[in-house]
Image (cartoon, grey):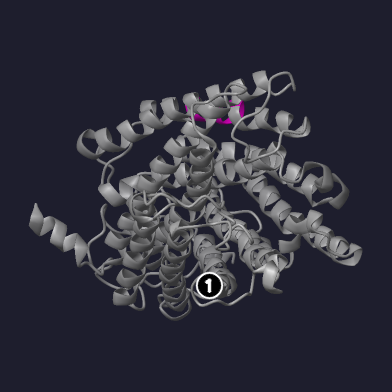
Amino acid sequence: MWTKVHEWAVTVDHKKLGVMYIASALGFFLIAGLEATLMRIQLAFPNNDFLPPTTFNRLFTMHGTTMVFLVGMPMFFGFANYLTPLMIGARDLAFPRLNAFGFWLFLFGGLLLYFSFLGGDGLYGAGTAPDVGWFAYSPLTGRAFSRGNSTDYWTLGILVSGLGSTATALNLATTIITMRCPGMTYGKMPLFVWLMLVNCILSLVILTPLTAAQVMLLFDRFLGAHFFDTQAGGSAVLWQHFFWFFGHPEVYVLILPAFAIASEVVPVFSRKPLFGYPFMVGATVMIGFISMSVWAHHMFVVGLSPAANTFFAASTMAIAVPTGIKIFNWLGTMWGGKIRFRMPMMWCTAFIFSFVIAGLTGVMLAIAAWDFQLSDSYFVVAHFHFVLIGGLLFNIFAAIYYWYPKVTGRMLDEKLGRLHFWIFVTGFYITFFTMHFPGLLGMPRRIYTYDAGRGWDTLNLICSLGVAVQAVGLLFFVWNLIRSYRKGEVAGDDPWDAWTLEWSTTSPPPEYNFERIPVVHSRRPLWDLKHPQDPDWKYE
């Protein structure tokens, strides 16, 4: 057993590191889910005393931080690590040791953050987790309002994880640009690879200001600097600019991989080539550019000038255009296809439906006047959970059902998968669709309790019951992963009759990926091999 542990601990194989990223992210996801469940128990009834307010503040800080930095980004790096070299016909990433270094930095940063429960001295010397929110607004993070070291654990943990993410993004982008197999021009790359390339470049750009802001915050807390100390002439709004220049493009860093997964799954299960490939690539690049000019829509109520509010409202609405192109192209791919509703396709279909709802509420929040009314209400919480669970998580489930056979050589059980799907999706809508209404009725976010008689009581109880339903669905998913690994149906090399290069290797793939580096002639190289009488390259 120790030999096996040592083998994984010292590996530089991109596939093993990809699995380690995904397994770590799933572990953090279960922890974040437990934190969310505790918060929903507290909010199920008015004037509930299940949790004290300090504990509630720590839980929503750790839940948000974990989901964004320790679940979303590492999950995307895990799939990119495992699949990118296989899809472009390479044997590994450009810098294998840097890849391992990036993973261990990410994991160490996450463990450092959670060590705060034991080591972050609070006012009375006991361990205490950060309680400043995942956004860590100034002046909450100043010494006057954040005593002890819990905020330092937040800053250092995210800083270290961010350095790991930067190393991995640089490595992936270099690999895609320099190591594609013969014949794979940019116009013939799988869309998954295109989206990962844009995503890595976007990550490199937006992580820089976040890293700078965290270093400046450490200077404030330890060296007497006053970048964000309003009492000494610093600016709290400066932190918001730094943070949201990272924070909103980060939404697209999380959602572009979800788009990448849907762009691989939908064509295979519709039995048609992806509709409008050049438009999909163009829309991806547009999203990458526009996403860096929308950050201040999180700051409409800060008091920016009318001209600034108008610009950021317009740019936020403009990003709906390339996003809409993607949705219409997925629907165009499904139109007239011979659709197979296996588990990956079911999750992608649920994603498209949920993401349309999230897009509509997103456009509503882009209107400054509307945002003035709903800023920091539960309507916003409902909106971004529709984006990140209905968008990101649904497609992560699709990806796990789709590529699990390639990684393990075994199929996931379809019956358990359908139980997981229907129960989890039902719980998701019970919780987050309902959550729009207390937001519209004025319920603020981040409050640990509320008085009865405001019209929020029943709605909050329904939201909390929905979380319990989601938890039952997740139990079926975890049981399926464990059971199918031992007793699942043997998958074979290409169980879905797919078209990209990763399916041309064995399941699981050998350490060197390909005995011979493949040569491709179209965007669907396996289709060309299976149908030499009607290859795609005749028509591209």
Tell which residue pokes out farthest to the right in this image.
306
Answer few, some or many: residues within 10 Å of disc 1's Cα (few below 14, many 20 plus, some between 14 and 19): many
Q: On the picture, is 177 further left or further right than 113?
A: right
In the orientation shown, which residue stands out farthest toward the front? 124
Which residue is at a point 46% across and 51% down the rendered structure image? 66
Asked if residue 354 is positioned above or below residue 512 in the image, the reply reads above
Q: Is residue 445 left or right of residue 3?
A: right
In the picture of the structure, the residue carrying the numbered disc 1 is 211
From where the camera sits, is residue 336 visible? Answer: no
Across and down, in percent, residue 248 comes to 65, 59
Residue 298's quadrant in the figure?
Answer: bottom right
| Residue 266 on image: x %, y % | 54, 46
**Frontmost residue, 197 versus 432:** 432
- Give the amino acid at mark 1: Thr
> 479 left or right of 59?
left
Count of picture labels: 1
| Residue 1 covered by magenta stretch | no
State the predominant SS element of the stretch in magenta: helix
State the image coordinates of residue 497 (x, y, percent, origin top left): 40, 47
On the question of residue 402 being in view, the answer is: yes
Residue drawn at x 26%, y 36% as measured from the top left? 482
Q: Point out the stretch of residues depicted in magenta.
A: 423-430
Give the percent coordinates (x, y) of residue 55: 48, 40
